[in-house]
Amino acid sequence: MRAGVAEVEARRIQPSAAVWGGLVVLLLLAAVFLFHETRGTALWFDDWMWVLGRRQTDAASFLDPHNGHFSLIPIAIYRVLFATVGLDSYAPYRVLVIAAHLVCVTLLFVYASRRVGGPLALLVAALLLFLGPAWSNILWPFQTAWLTSLASGIGALLLLDRRDRMGDIGASVLLMASLASSSIGLPVAIGLVVEIALGRRRWRDAWIVLAPLAVYALWWVLYQTSQTAPFTEDLMHAPGFIVNAVAGALSALTGLAGRTVPGGTPPAREWGYALALGGLALLTFRLARMRPVPARVVTLIAMALSFWTLTALNRAYLGADTPYSSHYRYVGCVFILLLVVELAPPLHLSTRTYLLGAGVVAAIVLSNLGAMRDGAGYLRGQAALTRAELGAIDLVRPIVKPDFVSTALPGYPFVVMRAESYFDVEDADGTPAASPAEIASEGELVRLSVDQTLIRAHGIALRPAAPGVALGARPAVESVTGGTVEERGPCVAFRPAQFTSGAAGGELQLTVPPAGVLLKAAGGTATVSMRRFADAYPKDPLGTLGPTGSARVPLRADLSDLPWHLRVTPEDRATVCGLG
């Protein structure tokens, strides 16, 4: 099945200098916009898995799978960044993912321009360039792995168009790069197998795909250890997953994507389903009119279907929203756009029609920019929490246990950040951790999270009060509700007003001395809470004293002079004394 005359002629189309200039302007605008939107982001989620677990020089550090992916090339890139720029600044990582995205867009433009001409190719490129619902592949540096696989795949298709020895060698090398960057290389490989089988029909050309697949198979045998959900469970969900994935990609390409970030409203599906049905009808109609169907069309259909199918067989069990994930949308949109320009009949459009198309694309881009900014805001929020959590661990470095794990770090429990491992990384490559002043300037939710981490790291709790415990500085009274206080040497005594006695209506807030406090309750229970950076106290208190109970809350010095604050909510009388 060889390419027809029209296909060969289409590949000779060369964009004009004006069109190339337009592309450069769009790329520059996008680069500035994306760099601005990623301000304030930091290493996140899987980034930390590589920071903590890919630091050795043995082969396994490079070749062990990450979440099932063969990630040799992106791991090598990250290792270079660790060694050269460290972890203090995220800017080089942001530049990396933006550059990878722009390369994908440029390759898509080149591919499309050879099929439908420069002006239409520019509109196609613009759709991918500002594809907001696919924000994670555009804004999160870790997804450079997927972008490398996709860029290598498009590049391989362009090189196969040359139909010469150098093109074939280059395509084989790029296929290997695609496979060695992420599992997105597998759909690329499946498509190229179809391309060689149908487009060449020569056994001697099989090496183009067999050589990289042999290397990948060897890696799989030696290193692949990933466990997935039962195949039968995924198989049952696969058809629905594929339909939803197609719907999600098409709704993104038309600016009708709905939800874009985790925790938002459920994704809008109705438009996607209608678009998927319409797209299937158009595909069927177009294929019926193409005799014979070009090999490249079958290649791209194989890539798209194998991507959605393989993803479904590994991820369908995770839930109904999984196919709408932004990183899956990006890949699906790339394959759809490649297929659309391959299926497009020869077009001779007027300037007015081009302008109308440009207006439609502009409206889609404007709709999708909101989704892009939502994604960027989500990443900035995750970064603020990450930096604050790391800053909290830094504060307690002199006293924290080596095996302490931050359970509030974004990505936990997948990202297990032990204090000892973190300090080793920090000493070697730096850290994006926030300073105490920066933590204090964060939002209340972040500061509450830091307080809970500090309470765990310090081991702050109500502990038995030994007889004859030494007392020190008196706690400073901040506020009193529902009673009165009397200062007695190192202690503050609270007595509830008569109408609140026994009704849990009193409250005493204090600034805690550096060594901690001794607490006593009489006549009723007393609930105790502590905070440090936050304005509010944590939802869960430290504990509750019995009606005649006593306890101490000892403190150890860390690297911040910021005092702790104590809230006692007694049913009756309570006394708080400073420890010596």
Image (cartoon, rainbow, N blue to C red):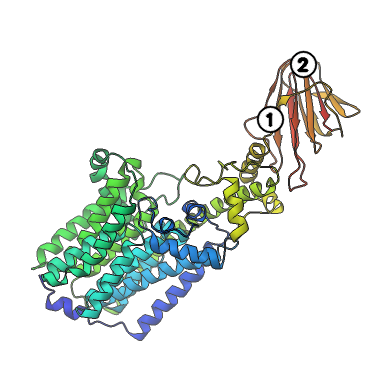
Q: Is residue 172 above or below residue 562?
A: below
Residue beneath the point at 26% across and 49% down:
242
Q: How many marks?
A: 2
Q: Position of residue 234 (x, y in %)?
A: 27, 42
Q: Position of residue 144 (x, y in %)?
A: 42, 62
Q: Is residue 214 left or right of residue 361?
A: left
Q: Nearer the viewer, residue 474 or 505?
A: 474
Label 1, residues with CA under 10 Å away: few <14, some 14-19, many ≥20: some
Can residue 94 be seen by looking at this rendering? Answer: no
Q: Is residue 272 above or below residue 87?
A: above
Q: Secondary structure at mark 1?
A: loop
Q: Nearer the viewer, residue 181 or 224?
A: 224
In the rendered image, the quadrant that contains the C terminus is top right
In the rendered image, the quadrant that contains the N terminus is bottom left
Residue extending farthest right: 489
Label 2, residues with CA under 10 Å away: few <14, some 14-19, many ≥20: some
Residue extending farthest front: 58
Q: Amino acid at mark 2?
A: Ser
Q: Nearer the viewer, mark 1 or mark 2?
A: 1
Q: Is residue 4 above or below residue 89?
A: below
Can residue 265 be seen by looking at this rendering? Answer: yes
Q: Amino acid at mark 1?
A: Ala
Res 164 → quadrant: bottom left
Q: Is residue 78 left or right of residue 395?
A: left
Q: Position of residue 516 (x, y in %)?
A: 78, 34
How far, Cα to Cα, is label 1 from label 2?
Answer: 26 Å
Q: Secondary structure at mark 2?
A: loop
Q: Position of residue 32 (x, y in %)?
A: 51, 70
Q: Give the residue number, with chain letter if any, for mark 2.
A: 501
Q: Give the residue number, with chain letter if any, for mark 1.
A: 461
Q: Nearer the viewer, residue 530 or 405?
A: 405
Q: Is residue 501 left or right of residue 86?
A: right
